[in-house]
Amino acid sequence: MDTKSDLESSNGLSRRRFLVGTGVAASAVLVTAACGSDDDTSSSGESTTSTQGGQQGASGDAAVAALAAGLEVLAVSTYKAALDAATAGKLGAVPPAGATFVQTAMAHHQEHLAAWNKVLKSAGQPEVTQPNATLKPTVDAELAKAKTFGDAAKLALTLEETAAATYLSAIPQLKDKTAIAQAASIQAIDAKHAAILLFVLGMYPVPDTFAKETKAVKA
């Protein structure tokens, strides 16, 4: 019996189970926060038209754009905070490829934000500069608890999966062809980000046959 090989195999399986379990836990916390806003009403009992991290009163494509922009601001700020924490040594050893991914993904989300703000500006709406207000407290709390690069990667995975699901859900709501193409293009990029993070965390990078809207945040 190759005891060393068996032990390494066992440790690898245990690590995979741990990562999967904690990843699911972080995901559940964020999805709960997102879903908790689905039935928000005003004090008078009437449904509000405010978007998560967007503008009051926005509707149609503008509401979707405002929601998307709020998620992009959140992604940029979260990756920036994770990068700052890593630079300060708060996340332990960070592989060079990990740092490169964070910087690249952050740049992608910054460009996505600019694209959605362009849509808002063309619709006569103000640009979004603040993160999604519903998800931000939960994301900040989860990031504050991160002790390793793996912890930060799990949070990033949940954010990317949430963004990808939101874009998938938003595509049928959009009317403008350019906005539809933009949402579809960004959804694919966020799904790729998620695939990379799944691989980094020791999980299969493309677990589903079809993209899902389960974690989507609604406008």
Image (cartoon, rainbow, N blue to C red):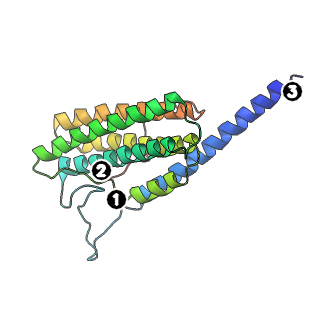
> Secondary structure under badge 1?
loop
Residue occupying the point 29% across, 44% down: 170
The residue that disc 2 covers is 70
**Gap between marks 1 and 2, in whole Å?**
8 Å
Residue occupying the point 17% across, 42% down: 119
Sequence-wise, the earlier of marks 3 and 1 is 3
Residue 73, percent from left and from top: 32, 47
Residue 37, percent from left and from top: 37, 61
The residue that disc 1 covers is 133
User: To which quarter of the image does residue 179 belong?
Assistant: top left
**Gap between marks 2 and 3, in whole Å?**
52 Å
Q: Amino acid at mark 1?
A: Ala
Residue 218, percent from left and from top: 33, 52
Q: Residues within 10 Å of mark 3 (few under 14, many from 20)?
A: few
Sequence-wise, the earlier of marks 2 and 3 is 3
Residue contact at pointers 2 and 3, CB within 8 angstroms = no
Q: Which mark is residue 3?
A: 3
> Secondary structure under badge 3?
helix
Q: For the view shown, which residue lies furthest in the right direction?
A: 1
Residue occupying the point 54% across, 43% down: 89
Side (left or right) of 216 relative to 142: left
Sequence-wise, the earlier of marks 1 and 2 is 2
User: To which quarter of the image does residue 4 belong?
Assistant: top right
The quadrant of the rendering that contains the N terminus is top right
> Secondary structure under badge 2?
helix
Residue 133 seen by the camera: yes
Q: For the view shown, which residue lies furthest in the top direction?
A: 2
Residue contact at pointers 1 and 2, CB within 8 angstroms = yes
Q: Amino acid at mark 2?
A: Gly
